[in-house]
Amino acid sequence: MDKSQKRISIEDVAQRAKVSITTVSRVINNVPTVSSKNRARVEEAIAFLKFKPNVSAQRLATGVNNSIGLVMPGYPGIFHSFYAIELIRGVGHACETLHLDLVFHITNGFNPLNTSNVGGVIFADIIENRKQVESALAAGTPCMVINNKVDDLDADYIAIDNKLGGKVAADYLISLGHKEIAIISGNLNTQAGLFRFEGFKKELENRKISLPAEYVFEGDYSRRCARQAAEKFFELKNRPTAIFACSDEMALEVINVAMEKGVKIPQELSIVGFDDSPACLYSSVGLTTIKQPLFEMAEQAVRLLNQIVNGKHTDKVKEMLAPKLVVRESCASPKG
Amino acid sequence: MDKSQKRISIEDVAQRAKVSITTVSRVINNVPTVSSKNRARVEEAIAFLKFKPNVSAQRLATGVNNSIGLVMPGYPGIFHSFYAIELIRGVGHACETLHLDLVFHITNGFNPLNTSNVGGVIFADIIENRKQVESALAAGTPCMVINNKVDDLDADYIAIDNKLGGKVAADYLISLGHKEIAIISGNLNTQAGLFRFEGFKKELENRKISLPAEYVFEGDYSRRCARQAAEKFFELKNRPTAIFACSDEMALEVINVAMEKGVKIPQELSIVGFDDSPACLYSSVGLTTIKQPLFEMAEQAVRLLNQIVNGKHTDKVKEMLAPKLVVRESCASPKG
DNA sequence: ATGAAAGCGCTAACAG
DNA sequence: CTGTTAGCGCTTTCAT
């Protein structure tokens, strides 16, 4: 149950350098008040013995824990989503530059989470794990929720303004002259799915453009349902001139279906996606889409959480990041 | 620099439950010898105080560290590769089931790595960071290298048998009757790139099939170079009847080029890829490819490393996992 | 500038 | 079955 070889401790270093352990501790922590002679001896000993301070002991002694947890929902497929990758990249990168240890957790939301070994926790979305956030909060661990506006929890959050995203899409299509605009929404049980839809719908209302029920298809971000939706829309006698698909995957599948049916994009049909995922690059026609600053959001989450952990940021964080329109080739003004 | 609120300790629990801290420790660790009455009181106190044991203290006291590090090279684009995702998934999943903390590190290979806060480290490939492995090893931390055969280091490793992968590809194409087989290799400075090429080449030799220099193109796994290669091959007067591309990305790009030039696949050209990446699913013709058990490799790495850390596995681990042929539609027998 | 000593929170003998 | 006690390796007063 234990490591076979005994680890080198600060005491071994002290012995070899013929100084007290206090002095060794001082050089480890770059305390200036150490004679250069002693410092040299200690450094030599450290190098010779290949000594590495025991982080657990340091944390216990100081009470400071320079690590943060990243909790990701574990539903199937998440790791093949652009979303998860960008978050991991962003969090990972920020931790690296701030010299924080990143403790990575995949969770189904049910197992209790012991957060006492991290200074703070980042929850990458909360699907079925509000309990975990509450319990972490109760244990006194600062929590930062990503991608969810959680005003009913005592957690800080930083999210994408999905309503704005929906609005931007609608706005762009309307400005092009479209009046028959359909939407393939995301899962409306998720905040992102719901908000994109709401933002889109409200903007249509504001601009006095009707959104008949037949122009609304509730999807789930999958290609399969996008295909269903597209086929349904194409059969309508009053075919929409534009479609807002709430994910790039869905938008790309709509393009596929359109090509199969000989519907020209963007001449006969405009389409805007959501995400700006790399998949866009390999599409036959450049997809106009809404880009979410995922990487930046993740980085920012780490930075703010770190400040909170260190008591340098006492206000609650409630940030909404604006998604941006990326214009490529999949939209045009409607004919006529 | 410190947490504002004072954490609840085992002592607070003991006080409230009116027992000794030892008893509290016993119930935390599920030691059976605790009267049910006391156990109940302690559990009540723990729940009431929302007590969570301090992991650093536990680790310091036991000397056991139930966490492992995952070190990933940080070169641009790695996180958008199928490779990285599968490794993260596999390692993450295994850690979750074994109740191990996963400490995630992105590294350029130059910063020294303090591995004293983890029981063992998994290096996801080693590009420029042999130094880090050596230093971790020197500090007494068990190291498991993934995807690299590193017999010259004292580390354990578990890798994909890339030579076998190259052989399998060659074998399959030859069995189909091809004699003019070209290869677009990966980066030959990486072990994977080199070994796939070597396995392929040797199999051709064994089967007495010649591999002229004009049939070899050193690529870098990118679409760009695959396009160059394909264009070059298509201009040859002695056009190959089959191409082995050492990554799916490259294979898919070859298919694209072929389609643009009106070369029919698989009738006029057979092509096999490497990876079995999800990108295959969206290709116009199903790509026959070599699948690497990345997820399994990552899981296995965690399991073995954990045994090593716990002294339950003393032999050096030197495993090679076999890649497997996945037949889809991109290959056929040559005409004539 | 340096060292002795008292913890940090927990576990693990060892008694009882 | 329960409590006392001695560390785990390091930081941090407090003297010197």
Image (tube, coloured by chain):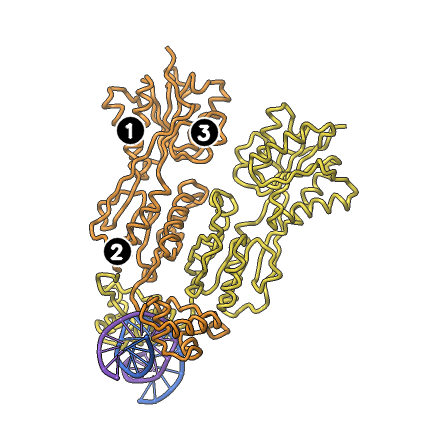
Chain colours: A orange, B yellow, C blue, D purple
Q: Which residue is tagged 2?
A: A137
Marking on residue A244: none
Would residue A218 be visible to someone looking at this image? Answer: no
Instruction: Please tell me which residue is depicted at 27% across the width and 65% down the height of the picture.
Output: B51
> Label 2 is placed on what type of residue?
Leu
- Asked which secondary structure carries label 3, the reply is helix
State the residue position of label 3.
A252
The crowd level at tag 3 (other Cα within 10 Å; few <14, some 14-19, many 20+) is many
Which residue sits furthest front?
A36
Q: Position of residue B138 (x, y in %)?
A: 51, 67
Quadrant of residue A100 within the rendered picture: bottom left
**Percent from the top left, x then y, of residue B4?**
22, 61
Q: Between residue B2 and residue C13, name the one nearer to us.
A: B2
Check residue A167 in the rendering and tell me which mark sits there, or answer none: 1
| Residue drawn where x is 29% and y is 28% of the image | A167
- Mark 1 neighbour class, 10 Å CA radius: few under 14, some 14 to 19, many 20 or more: many
Left or right of A148 in this view: A330: right
* Amino acid at circle 1: Lys
Residue A55 in view (yes/no):
yes
Which label lies toward us, 2 or 1? 1
C3 w.r.t. B329: above or below: below
* Disc 2 chain ID: A
Residue B272 position, x and y percent, is 64, 38
Mark 1 and 3 residues: CB-CB less than 8 Å, in contact?
Answer: no
Of the two numbered discs 3 and 2 on the same chain, state the one appearing first in sequence.
2
Q: Amino acid at mark 3?
A: Leu
Residue count near mark 2 (Cα–Cα under 10 Å), binned few <14, some 14–19, many ≥20: some
Q: Nearer the viewer, residue A323 or A228?
A: A323
Q: Is the residue A202 above or below the residue B59 in the image?
A: above
